[in-house]
Amino acid sequence: MKQLALSLLLLTGAASAQDVLIRHATVHTAGVRGTLKNADVLVQGGIIRAVGPGLLVPPGVPVVEAGGKPLSPGLFAGLGDIGLEEVSGEDSTVDGAQSFGGNGLAPQMRPEFDVTVAFNPHSMLIPVARMDGLTFSALAANPTGGGSLVAGQGGVVRLDGDYANPLGGRQLYVSLGSSADSLGGKSRAAQFMLLDQALREARGLTPYGSPYALLTPAGRETLAKYLLGGRVLFNVDRAADIHQVLLFARRNGLRPIIVSGAEAWVVAKELAAANVPVILDSLQNLPSSFDAIGSRLDNAALLHKAGVRVAFTQFEFASHNARKVRQEAGNAVANGLPWEAGLAGLTSVPANALGVGDKVGRIEPGLIADLVLWTGDPLEVTTLASQVWMAGKPMPMRSRQTQLRDRYLQAPDALPRAYSH
């Protein structure tokens, strides 16, 4: 343990930052190689170069002795608004949804709304999430707070504190079911009717200038791109609605992803046959609405058994409590999901589903070296991240929360605590 602490201390102070050899770790690759005991991971230039036992140390590359501790890819922080929200009760700090006023003739859908341009890499929430091993997140246009069935677009970002474009292409967020009643004429049939109309406009089948148009010209151009196989995330729970989403997506050439999916287990075979992943809240075991009467704790296990790819997200207060996503995966494992599938649900599955699996989500040569060294099982809530690396750089293991803790836990000196700095 002393050797590990010393190695981490030396590495944290290293200026080069992008090269490291992590030695003698239990490497959870989240890929086809599974878990490797007593293995090494070589990182050079911020990229994973080799994974295996007994790797040679290139000249000048710092070494971290893991001592058999688990090493995983950086984890998925879920769908949310980390970097888009600071204080949920203060509107000036919330950028994850749009709401335009106007009369009934104003456009009702704005798919061109793209939340990624509002991303703040210096958000105080990012270090909090990163300290718990979360290194990438899907910025989501709020599917229930945007004033439209089509909430807008989002993208996947790395939580390294740097200004950068999202890792991959955009995803479109759509809300259906009872949570979108006020947005779709108080009827599920009306919701699909409006979506059909929007797609007709995107195809140019409705002339510009109609007083009842749903889309702006920019909205038509944006939505048309998703008709070529773009990823569309449907926030939907009821099994019957999920069935209709699959039919709708097939008719229109969309690439759907089911989000929430409280009753997804009911249509697991359909989802598997259509190769549609589900990003769910595995703690959803009581019906929060009539759409979720069939909620159950083994939802993820049943989906996995049927061949559905399952990922996890934290819905309630997702930004400020994103770290709870590890509990999501752990509870799914406790209710029948294989452990490796639980880890994949926080790494490779969401990365692949959201189109960034060629960059993050696994410990394999050629991928970005976003890595986490743990004190124990990554899916156990009492486990801590010893060190997080992003592109081979050791991240500071502190946040505003820990800084406040340390400040006010200091022993008082000649002056009162208020004078501490």
Image (cartoon, helix red, strand yellow):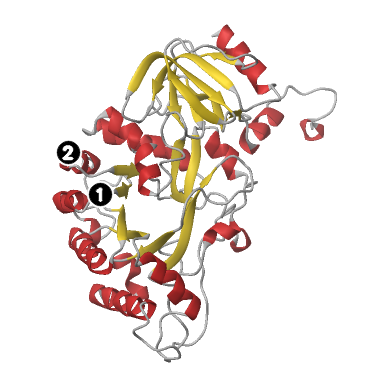
Q: Is residue 6 left or right of residue 288?
A: right
Residue depicted at x 34% and y 84%:
205
Q: Residue furthest right?
A: 414
Q: Nearer the viewer, residue 342 or 400?
A: 342
x 55%, y 32%: residue? 131
Which residue is tagged 2?
305
Kindly tell me whether residue 141 is visible in this rendering.
Answer: no
**Foreground residue among 165 and 2:** 165
Q: Secondary structure at mark 1?
A: loop
N-terminal of the pair, mark 2 or mark 1, is: 1
When asked about the image quadrant of residue 290, the answer is bottom left
User: Is 183 placed above or below 324 here?
Assistant: below
Q: Which residue is mark 1?
A: 286
- Which quadrant holds residue 223? bottom left
Q: Residue at position x 73%, y 21% from top?
A: 411
Instruction: In the rendered view, tell whether residue 309 sits above or below residue 415.
Output: below
Indicate the amino acid at tag 2: Lys
Cα separation between marks 2 and 1: 22 Å
Q: Residue 32 at x, y = what percent?
A: 31, 29
Mark 1: which amino acid?
A: Leu
Q: Position of residue 392 (x, y in %)?
A: 57, 28
